[in-house]
Amino acid sequence: HCELHSIATKFGSIAAQDRRDPQEKTGFAFVHCRVTGSGPVYVGRAMGQYSRIVFAYTYFDDVVAAEGWDDWDHESSKD
């Protein structure tokens, strides 16, 4: 269990993960969490082409940006 509290005023990101090879066994997993704060925030920011961030069984206050996540212009991340 965890609680993540954003104090963003313009925009923020909960997590940013860099994974450049699909075979890498890396990523972030947030399980049974609560996300609160002032927002708006992206739930994730893809710093690499194969970035992986998972939120499972997580409650979000009304702080998530409409886009949800930021792909940092990685075209292949949009698939």
Image (cartoon, helix red, strand yellow):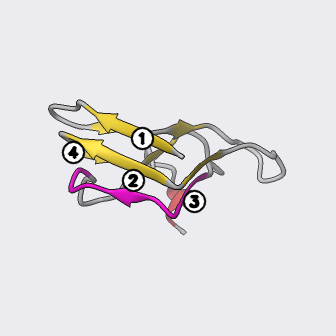
Give the number of the mark in front: 1 or 2. Answer: 1
CA separation, marks 3 and 2?
14 Å
Residue beneath disc 1? 3
Give the number of the mark in front: 3 or 1. Answer: 1
Where does the image place residue 32, in percent across and percent down from the top left?
Answer: 52, 55
Residue occupying the far right of the picture: 23
| Amino acid type shown at disc 3 | Ser
Secondary element type, mark 4: loop
Secondary element type, mark 3: helix
Give the number of the mark in front: 3 or 4. Answer: 4
> Which segment is the magenta one?
53-63
Residue beneath disc 2? 69
Mark 4 touching mark 2, by CB under 8 A? no
Residue 76's disc number: 3
Secondary element type, mark 1: strand
Residue drawn at the location 62% of the way across and 51% of the way down: 52
Residue beneath disc 4? 40
Mark 1 touching mark 2, by CB under 8 A? no
Secondary element type, mark 2: strand
In the image, 77: left or right of 63?
Answer: right
Quadrant in which the C terminus appears = bottom right
